[in-house]
């Protein structure tokens, strides 16, 4: 019987996971390869035979997504599978139309088919868009579990941008672990904040193996999602973070809307930064889309030691890269802090950008006088450093989850902006929900 030929559209994360848990060992399918987008420099690799299983003894090719229709026709692909996140619904259908136009079916795999089951209780933190505030929410839950004498081990959404075989299972407990795995800025932004607080983080490529290893160290597994993707591990408590600064996005992006509809808890973050009408609009959308979920408001509280130094200064704003790029935000917490502390001007970094940073500004023209902290590899980190130091300003204000000063040399005064989750609901919010979850486990 002929095997069904499949092409997986991805971005070095969900695509590999879907292959591993659905297609790798199923002889009714023949995956011809992957395509790659969103992340620079990942489309020239090969999914290695060490990970691809006996049906694929030489591994699988990874091609650029551009022109994937030609691959469909040349290789006789029957089904194109979309396997990456934070896409507007219209963009999903454009990809579907391209697949249909080339003669293939188009498929999305649901969470039930792709989530790994764990023997330990699982709390998942997801979002409706990139940049809603998952990280501080995950930190809050991890700290709450620690206060309850429960060992939380964090499993992070994948970011395997290097040697895939070597990244099969990654465990991060120290800065040395991150250096040994040659982590990019984007990876360090997600791992370092947890390691700083004494938590162990797992990530990698093979999430069945990752879960089994993490279970050996955990009382509770805490899924820390990426972008607006659905969980890779089946949650017992599903928390979805929504953003009232982008009202309406909760039902306009894939697969964030699925998170919104599946959640046990919908957390409307940044509720003190957005107009009340926008907060209310997201709460109303939650009631309409998922009335069984408990909807809460929360704040993303800025922490800016020495913030008074911004007063009257010309500042360069540096913010989290993914939030500004495929998250679609024109600015981030650095601008909020600069406005709050009275900076006189945000200097436009575009005229001073070099190399791939110039290309980022060309691609994401919505960016408003802010520099995305891009660092997918040593060359891009160097270009980010050159851009920062070439931009004329009195002060660099960076609001990246990682301490950017550890990775780039900034040749002028700099301030770091951090942000932490803060409860808003009288009588108990997310903390009370976590307490109740632990009591019944």
Image (cartoon, rainbow, N blue to C red):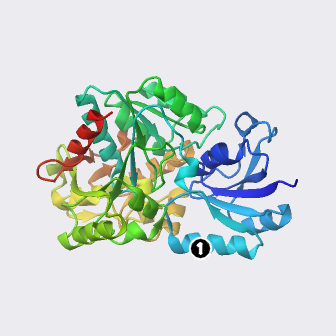
Expressed as whole percent of the image width and height from the top left, the position of residue 417 reads 26, 48
Expressed as whole percent of the image width and height from the top left, the position of residue 435 reads 23, 38
Badge count: 1
Q: Secondary structure at mark 1?
A: helix
Task: Name the residue: 33% across, 33% down.
Answer: 441
Task: Name the residue: 56% across, 46% down.
Answer: 379
Q: Is residue 168 above or below residue 347?
A: above
Horizontally, residue 206 falls left or right of residue 273, namely: right
The residue carrying mark 1 is 93
Instruction: Determine if residue 281 is in view.
Output: yes
Residue 367 location, quadrant: bottom left
Question: Which residue is situated farthest in the left direction here?
Answer: 426
Horizontally, residue 87 falls left or right of residue 18, namely: left
Task: Name the residue: 62% across, 51% down.
Answer: 15
Say which of 184 and 242 sits in front: 242
Say which of 298 and 381 sits in front: 298
Q: Is residue 200 above or below residue 331?
A: above
Expressed as whole percent of the image width and height from the top left, the position of residue 94 reads 61, 74
Q: Is disc 1 surrounded by few (<14), some (14 to 19) or many (20+) residues within 10 Å?
A: few
Instruction: Determine if residue 128 is in view.
Output: no
Residue 285 location, quadrant: bottom left
Question: Which residue is situated farthest in the right direction here?
Answer: 1
Expressed as whole percent of the image width and height from the top left, the position of residue 357 reads 50, 58
Say which of 393 and 311 sits in front: 311
């Amino acid at each position: 019987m002929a095997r069904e030929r499949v092409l997986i559209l991805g971005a070095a994360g969900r695509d590999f996971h879907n292959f591993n848990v659905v297609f790798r060992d199923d002889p009714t399918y023949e995956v011809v390869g992957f395509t790659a987008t969103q992340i620079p420099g990942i489309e020239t690799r090969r999914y290695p035979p060490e990970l691809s299983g006996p049906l694929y003894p030489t591994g699988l090719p990874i091609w650029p997504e551009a022109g994937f229709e030609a691959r469909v026709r040349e290789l006789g692909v029957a089904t194109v599978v979309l396997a990456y996140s934070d896409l507007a619904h219209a963009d999903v259908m454009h990809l579907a139309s391209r697949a249909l136009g080339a003669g293939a079916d188009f498929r999305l795999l649901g969470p039930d088919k792709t989530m790994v089951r764990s023997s330990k209780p699982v709390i998942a933190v997801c979002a409706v868009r990139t940049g809603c505030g998952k990280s501080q929410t995950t930190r809050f839950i991890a700290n709450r579990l620690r206060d309850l004498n429960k060992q939380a081990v964090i499993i992070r959404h994948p970011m395997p941008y290097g040697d895939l075989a070597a990244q099969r299972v990654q465990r991060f407990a120290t800065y040395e672990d991150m250096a040994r795995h040659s982590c990019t800025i984007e990876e360090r932004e997600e791992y370092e904040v947890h390691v700083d607080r004494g938590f162990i983080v797992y990530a990698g490529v093979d999430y069945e193996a990752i879960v089994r290893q993490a279970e050996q160290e955990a009382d509770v597994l805490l899924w820390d999602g990426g972008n607006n993707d659905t969980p890779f591990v089946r949650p017992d408590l599903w928390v979805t973070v929504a953003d009232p600064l982008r009202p309406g996005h909760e039902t306009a992006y894939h697969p964030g809307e699925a998170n919104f509809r599946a959640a046990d808890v919908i957390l409307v973050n940044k509720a003190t930064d957005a107009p009340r009408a926008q907060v209310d609009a997201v709460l109303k959308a939650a009631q309409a889309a998922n009335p069984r979920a408990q909807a809460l408001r929360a704040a993303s509280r800025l922490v800016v030691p020495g913030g008074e130094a911004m007063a009257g200064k010309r500042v360069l704003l540096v913010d989290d890269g993914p939030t500004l790029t495929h998250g679609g935000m024109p600015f981030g917490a650095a601008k909020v802090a600069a406005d709050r502390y009275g900076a006189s001007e945000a200097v436009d970094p575009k005229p001073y950008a070099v190399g791939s940073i110039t290309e980022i500004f060309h691609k994401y023209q919505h960016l408003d006088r802010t520099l995305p902290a891009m660092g997918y590899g040593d060359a891009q980190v160097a270009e980010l450093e050159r851009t920062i130091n070439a931009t004329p300003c009195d002060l660099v204000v960076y609001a990246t989850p990682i301490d950017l000063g550890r990775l780039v040399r900034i040749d002028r005064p700099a301030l770091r902006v951090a942000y932490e989750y803060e409860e808003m609901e009288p009588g108990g919010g997310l903390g009370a929900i976590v307490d109740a979850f632990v009591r019944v486990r």
